[in-house]
Amino acid sequence: MINVIILGAGGHAKEVYSTIDYMNATHSFKKYNIVGFYDDATERTSLLNFKVFKKIDDIVDKNIKVVLGVGTPQAKSILIEKFQQRGFSLETIIHPTTFVSPFAKIGIGAVIQSYCLIQPDVKIGNYFSCNDHVQIGHDAVIGDNVHINPNVNISGGAHIGDNTFIGVKATILRVKVGSNCIIGACSLINKDVPDFSKAKGIPARYTPSDGKISFGNR
Ligand SMILES: CC(C)(COP(=O)(O)OP(=O)(O)OC[C@H]1O[C@@H](n2cnc3c(N)ncnc32)[C@H](O)[C@@H]1OP(=O)(O)O)[C@@H](O)C(=O)NCCC(=O)NCCS
């Protein structure tokens, strides 16, 4: 049994909790004891009947592993740095219904939700968070600290830079998407996208990004 704390106490954290719950309830070879959630930017004191920690010093056992439960690249970076500075290490979580080719490489701290398919010779950096039903084709290259929302399709050979956020149901053809980009929901990316851009629409057009991601209720 591995003790874990989920970073974040929002909607994405709840879904990551579900993945761990599923692993514990099925015949997954790894079992987890969830100690709680961590979020220093919420009023919440509990989530799904677990405590929400607000100070890292309240987590005394340094053997507790941390699991990424936030989606925006900026929030991930801040939380990861805080926990790594205090000696915590990250646990990789892959939903049992997801298939990762043994010929794919994934860095540390990934969280990959249900029914994803990661094909041979895909290379993914550290701190990857990937929601349900995502397909990543052969030879695609994905940088560090990327977040992918549900039902995204990334074609074989596509490149995605560091800290990029890909909105729900986007399709990325065999192109290069830069670092620190925001890809709008349902967009079709059929041309290269420069660093620090926001791209949206079918086919997508890009503009400089102010780095803000509007989730709303979309
Ligand atoms: C693209 C996005 C980041 C917003 O960008 P923005 O530049 O701030 O856009 P705004 O909300 O100011 O809207 C500006 C225009 O773009 C349009 N627009 C917004 N998002 C769009 C999208 N994904 N595709 C096409 N057009 C979009 C708006 O309708 C609006 O059009 P209008 O000027 O004709 O009225 C956001 O809409 C988005 O898609 N976020 C991803 C959300 C997501 O996937 N969340 C995860 C859920 S699981």
Image: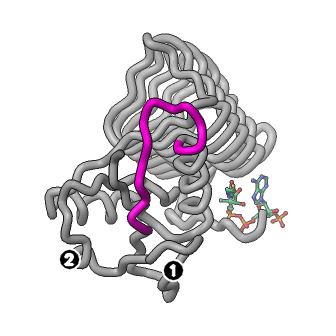
Kindly state the secondary structure of the residue where label 2 is placed. Answer: helix
Left or right: 185 as drawn, with respect to 91: right
Left or right: 6 as drawn, with respect to 214: left
Q: Position of residue 103 (x, y in %)?
A: 43, 11
From the viewer's perspective, is residue 130 above or below residue 62? above
Residue occupying image coordinates x 72% and y 70%: 216
Q: Is residue 189 visible?
A: no
Q: Position of residue 189 (x, y in %)?
A: 68, 35
Q: Quadrant of the C terminus?
A: bottom right
Q: Position of residue 121 (x, y in %)?
A: 45, 12
Label 2: how many Cα within 10 Å (few below 14, some 14–19, many 20+): few
Question: In the drawing, what numbered circle is on residue 46?
Answer: 1
Q: Quadrant of ligand 1?
A: bottom right
Task: Give the residue at mark 2.
Answer: 57
Residue numbers of the magenta segment: 24-36
Q: Position of residue 215 (x, y in %)?
A: 67, 66
Question: In the drawing, what numbered circle is on residue 106?
Answer: none
Residue 28 part of the magenta-drawn span: yes
Left or right: 15 as drawn, with respect to 204: left
Q: Amino acid at mark 1?
A: Ser
Q: Amino acid at mark 2?
A: Asp
Q: Tell me which label, 2 or 1, sits earlier in the chain.
A: 1
174 or 47: which is nearer to us?
47
Q: Is residue 108 visible?
A: yes
